Image (cartoon, rainbow, N blue to C red):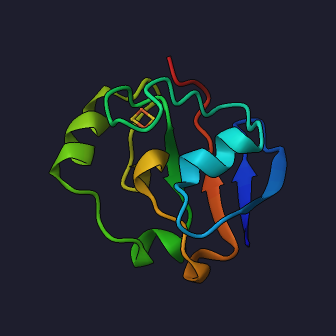
Amino acid sequence: MITIHFIAADGRATSVQGKPGKSLMEAAVAAGIDGIAADCGGLLTCATCHLHVQEPFASSLPPPDGEELGMLEFTAAPRNAASRLSCQIKLTPALDGLTVQLPATQY
Ligand code: FES
């Protein structure tokens, strides 16, 4: 298991355990993290699993593919260079300590 830190829009931090091989979205939903809706269940059709990945992890992740980039056009909260869809981030041991910022809204 690896540790993931979710920072809510109000600054509140929650640390959860995630299993390598699962997606970041799945770890968030399993832990009941508010702010990740994941309406499509990871099918890359909703953009309600949007979050911002903090460094140094943002730079070390594989970049978003064309489908993720296309869906990132539909995030409710403003998108920035650190924006990702959490259903497209696969957890690996190298991501232990991953810290992500949740947007204020997914709708
Ligand atoms: S859960 Fe729908 S795009 Fe990620």
In x, y percent, where is residue 36?
61, 34
State the residue at coordinates (56%, 46%).
Answer: 25
Residue drawn at 52 percent across, 55 percent down = 23
Ligand 1 sits in quadrant:
top left
Report the number of discs: 0
Tell me where residue 105 appears, x and y as whole percent.
58, 24
Q: In screen coordinates, is 5 left or right of 78? A: right
Closer to the camera in the image, 80 or 14? 14
* 89 in relation to 46, above or below: below
Quarter where residue 5 is shown? bottom right
Q: Which residue appears farthest toward the top when viewing the image?
A: 107
Residue 65 x/y as whole percent: 21, 56
For residue 18, above or below residue 42: below
Of residue 78 and residue 3, the one placed in the foreground of this image is: 3
Instruction: Tell me which residue sits at (60%, 81%) in the image.
Output: 93
Q: Nearer the viewer, residue 28 or 11?
A: 28
Quarter of the figure with residue 89: bottom left
Q: Position of residue 85 (x, y in %)?
A: 42, 45
